[in-house]
Image (spheres, helix red, strand yellow):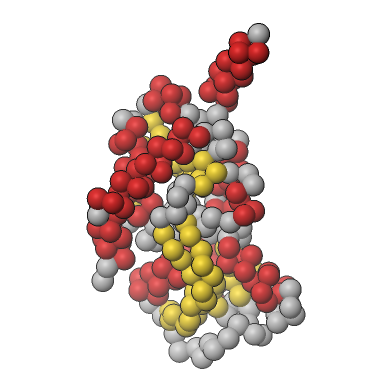
């Protein structure tokens, strides 16, 4: 009776949570991301969805033998979408944190990142004290400001403005609504490279690592994702991908 009950429970999980079996039956892997985060995920000039995370997602779909569907979701809603079984996987420059690990499982790390401060060109930005700071809601950048600047009184909470999407934050910077943006360093450098009139000021070492996130009930999918990442890294293909998106 106990074994039968366990089998029924596992069958229930397979219908409620994404697993390899259900993904293959569906014929597609649904990956959630936020397409305002170059060079990890963005829409290029030809209107194609591209980036390092998209390349990794394609490799995972290929390993599963299914098509890839990318869903563009506001960053702060990605984990909610995963918990609600709207997507199978999150690949979105998502930093592995203890708080997030309470609700999702992460793959092995695939990228090391720090935070960076960017501003309009010609500004003398030596520190964040007294500055109005733009962040993306729900990111580690927002949390870092809360823990390291607001908590100790370096800046008032009113000086931190959260935005759902980076294009909106960039517009706020250009309009002078904020003095700086705090965001992941590779993305900050990409914005400075691609958007005229911006400058990179300094980086803040935070020891962050990105990982893919899956539901805690999707352990078989997590194992497969880890296998794909490990194979990419040991084969040298991952290094080629990084050079493709971060090379000059």
The x and y percentages for residue 171 are 51, 70
Instruction: Name the residue nearer the viewer: 119 or 243.
Output: 243
Instruction: Name the residue nearer the viewer: 114 or 26.
Output: 114
Which residue lies at the image location 66% right of the left edge and 85% below the top edge?
130
In the image as oriented, which residue stretches furthest toward the front?
2
Direction from residue 138 to residue 30 in the image, left or right: left
Direction from residue 6 to residue 43 in the image, left or right: left
Which residue lies at the image location 46% right of the left edge and 66% below the top edge?
113
Image: 132 above or below 68? below
Q: How many marks?
A: 0
The x and y percentages for residue 74 are 54, 51
The x and y percentages for residue 194 are 35, 71
Image: 1 above or below 226? above
The x and y percentages for residue 67 are 33, 33
Quarter containing the N terminus: top right
Image: 132 above or below 184? below
Which residue lies at the image location 58% right of the left edge and 60% below the top edge?
139
Direction from residue 121 to residue 168 in the image, left or right: right
Quarter containing the C terminus: bottom left
- The reply to whether residue 72 is in sight is no
The quarter of the picture where residue 223 lies is top left
- The reply to whether residue 143 is in sight is yes
Which residue lies at the image location 44% right of the left edge and 63% below the top edge?
112
The quarter of the picture where residue 86 lies is top right
């Amino acid at each position: 009776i106990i074994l039968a009950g366990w089998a029924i429970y596992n069958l229930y999980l397979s219908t409620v949570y994404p697993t390899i079996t259900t993904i293959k039956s569906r014929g597609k892997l649904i990956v959630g991301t936020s397409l305002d985060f170059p060079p990890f995920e963005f829409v290029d000039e030809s209107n194609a969805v591209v980036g390092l995370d998209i390349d990794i997602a394609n490799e995972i779909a290929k390993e599963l033998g299914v098509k890839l569907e990318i869903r563009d979701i506001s960053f702060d809603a990605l984990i909610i979408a995963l918990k609600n079984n709207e997507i199978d996987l999150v690949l979105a420059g998502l930093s592995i944190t203890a708080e997030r690990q309470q609700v999702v499982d992460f793959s092995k790390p695939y990228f090391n990142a720090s935070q960076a401060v960017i501003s309009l060109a010609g500004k003398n930005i030596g520190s964040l004290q007294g500055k109005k700071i733009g962040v993306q809601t729900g990111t580690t950048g927002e949390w870092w400001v809360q823990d390291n600047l607001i908590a100790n009184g370096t800046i008032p909470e009113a000086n931190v403005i959260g935005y759902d999407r980076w294009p909106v934050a960039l517009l706020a910077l250009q309009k002078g609504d904020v003095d700086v943006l705090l965001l992941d360093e590779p993305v900050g450098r990409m914005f400075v490279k691609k958007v005229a009139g911006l400058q990179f000021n300094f980086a803040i070492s935070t020891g962050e690592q990105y990982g893919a996130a899956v539901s805690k009930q999707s352990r078989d999918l997590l194992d497969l994702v880890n296998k794909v990442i490990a194979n990419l890294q040991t084969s040298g293909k991952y290094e080629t991908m990084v050079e493709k998106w971060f090379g000059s």
